[in-house]
Image (spheres, helix red, strand yellow):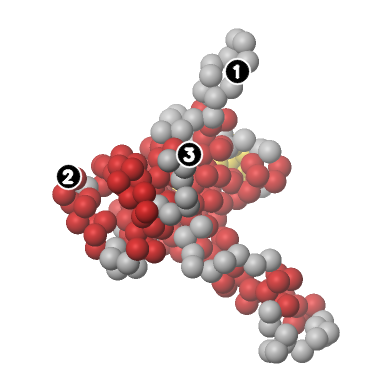
């Protein structure tokens, strides 16, 4: 039967995917079922199943494969680059607002904005207001800020810039988002998400990373649970 776009309408299949994605977050299947039922309204359950099933296939159990003679099918810095993009896409999708670009947002505010816009300062103020609702980086920072303190500590300690680890979860989220953007916009592969310690010289000096994919996925799964708990 083809998928009709409703996850709750196909709940049995997608709930299995969701449990596989987040099994380590729950003591047993009954605990998972209790959490799922606590979401109550169908729209929230639908959103939970969408995010978790996508995460299972795109990230947790998904890899980018190549078919080039003489090379491994899965190369970590290739597949991890795509996984980081997928993770942030899922985080950015956790909003009830339908995305608008800046022009659409301005056009919808004709009754409250006097056109023409007078100067760069006014334009900047409007753009800052737009980003409060539609800025991707704000949603991503908010996602990481809701993590438990021990999870924030692990993430911040995994990245050291210069002589010290990153000191706030906001800076850590921005650091990861910049990695995602460098790959999306400049095709710079994500090298610092790795099972071994890596070093990179950038604009801010030497960066040492001990950020494994397991650490990142552990944080994402905690974040998903925290996000949906906050909605109940």
Kindly indicate whether the residue at mark 2 contacts the one at mark 3 (C-beta within 8 angstroms): no
The disc, 3 or 1, on the residue closer to the chain's N-terminal end is: 3
Image quadrant in which you'd find residue 23: top left
| SS class, disc 2 | loop
Q: Is residue 61 above or below residue 184?
A: above
What residue is shown with label 1?
67
Image quadrant in which you'd find residue 72: top right
Residue 164 seen by the camera: no
68 vs 20, left or right, is right
Q: Is residue 30 above or below residue 142?
A: above
- Residue 58: which numbered mark, if any? 3
| SS class, disc 1 | loop
Kindly indicate whether the residue at mark 2 contacts the one at mark 1 (C-beta within 8 angstroms): no
100 vs 137, left or right, is right
Give the residue at x 35% y 45%: 14
Residue 68 seen by the camera: yes
* Nearer the observer, 202 or 4: 4
- Residue 31: which numbered mark, if any? none
Q: State the CA–CA distance, disc 3 to disc 1.
A: 19 Å
232 vs 69, left or right, is left
Q: State the CA–CA distance, disc 3 to disc 2.
A: 24 Å
Give the residue at x 30% y 42%: 16
Quarter containing the N terminus: top left
Image quadrant in which you'd find residue 211: top left
Give the image location of residue 33, x and y in percent. Answer: 21, 52
* Nearer the observer, 108 or 9: 9
Give the image location of residue 46, x and y in percent. Answer: 39, 57
* Nearer the observer, 66 or 2: 2
Give the residue at x 59% y 46%: 180
């Amino acid at each position: 039967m083809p998928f009709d776009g409703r996850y709750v309408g196909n709940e049995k299949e997608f709930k299995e995917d969701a449990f596989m994605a987040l099994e380590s977050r729950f003591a047993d299947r009954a605990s998972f079922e209790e959490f799922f039922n606590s979401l109550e309204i169908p729209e929230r359950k639908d959103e939970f199943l969408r995010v978790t099933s996508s995460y299972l296939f795109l990230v947790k159990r998904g890899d980018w494969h190549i078919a080039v003679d003489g090379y491994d099918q899965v190369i970590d810095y290739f597949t991890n680059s795509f996984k980081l993009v997928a993770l942030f896409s899922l985080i950015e999708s956790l909003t009830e607002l339908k995305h608008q670009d800046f022009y659409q947002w301005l056009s919808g505010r004709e009754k409250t904005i006097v056109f023409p816009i007078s100067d760069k300062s006014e334009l900047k103020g409007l753009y800052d207001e737009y980003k409060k609702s539609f800025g991707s980086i704000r949603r991503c920072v908010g996602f990481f800020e809701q993590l438990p303190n021990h999870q924030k500590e692990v993430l911040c300690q995994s990245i050291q810039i210069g002589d010290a680890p990153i000191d706030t979860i906001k800076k850590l989220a921005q650091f990861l988002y910049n990695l995602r953007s460098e790959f999306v916009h400049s095709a710079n592969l994500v090298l610092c998400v790795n099972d071994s310690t890596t070093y990179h010289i950038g604009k801010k000096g030497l960066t040492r990373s001990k950020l494994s994919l397991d650490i990142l996925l552990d944080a994402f799964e905690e974040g998903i649970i925290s996000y949906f708990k906050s909605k109940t």
